[in-house]
Image (cartoon, rainbow, N blue to C red):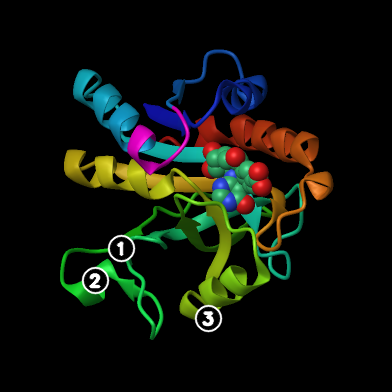
Amino acid sequence: MILVVTAVEVERAAVLRGIPAGARVEVLAVGVGPAAAAAGTAWYLARNPGVTTVVSAGIGGGVLTRVPLGELAVATRSIAADLGADSPDGFITLDDLGFGATSLPATDLALPGAVRGAVLTVSTVTGTAARAADLEKRYPDAVAEGMEGFGVAQACAVAGVAFGEVRAISNAVGPRDRAAWKIGPALDALASFGAAVATLDG
Ligand SMILES: O=C(O)c1cccc(C(=O)CC[C@H]2O[C@@H](n3cnc4c(=O)[nH]cnc43)[C@H](O)[C@@H]2O)c1
């Protein structure tokens, strides 16, 4: 069975809107941020041994030169982009500090038309051009940013279950501009993911 993990109920409802009746897919909303995502996913996996794949799904920021607003980005890997230490010489990742990995592989979700690349997980939404440029320099393969993927990925790694991530692009990774958000089209894109997700199971 496939488990889809969203942050909030409106994302859950959008995914459910697309899922055909009778599909073996469970959709769970677990809260915003990597900690809520890891805890909710681990809780569900401990009680449901039949889950084969977990997909972290939600709206997200996009690198708009790679993926337009209202389209889907599929992760090739999930990166904890702000897990580490700041320094006068720049950001030091947890890997470079020697405390663990900040990149986990993602299973390729066969979603036609979606853009593939690294999806960043952050605890603070990017809101300046300077931070967007820093992230792009550190992760040139990044296409999108969200707040939950790496938490779901870590729970999956512990449980030995396949992990995937999809982000429906609602805004740019860049200077904060709430007026430019496209939440409706992003939720419609999440529904189109819902329509395809049942076909991803084995
Ligand atoms: O107030 C703001 O400026 C702002 C900008 C983007 C997102 C938020 C949120 O509080 C939504 C967090 C929620 O949505 C996902 N999300 C959507 N866009 C982004 C983004 O650009 N960077 C990171 N996460 C984003 C996220 O996964 C959360 O579930 C507020």
Q: Is residue 52 magenta?
A: no
Q: Callout 1: 10 Å neighbours few (<14), some, many (20+)?
A: many
Residue to which mark 2 is pinned: 95
Residue 137 is labelled as 3
- In the foreground, 118 or 108: 118
Q: In the rendering, at what x and y percent does residue 26 appear?
A: 44, 21
Q: Are marks 1 and 2 in contact (CB under 8 Å)?
A: yes
Residue to which mark 1 is pinned: 102
Secondary structure at badge 1 equals: loop
Q: Amino acid at mark 3?
A: Lys
**Quarter of the picture for ligand 1?**
top right
* Point 21% across, 24% down: residue: 49
Q: Indicate which disc, 1 or 2, sits on the residue closer to the N terminus.
A: 2
Seen in the image, is 34 located left or right of residue 188?
left
**Magenta segment boundaries in residue numbering:** 31-36
Secondary structure at badge 3 equals: helix
* Point 55% across, 55% down: residue: 145
- In the foreground, 93 or 46: 93
Q: Amino acid at mark 2?
A: Asp
Q: Is residue 193 above or below residue 135?
A: above
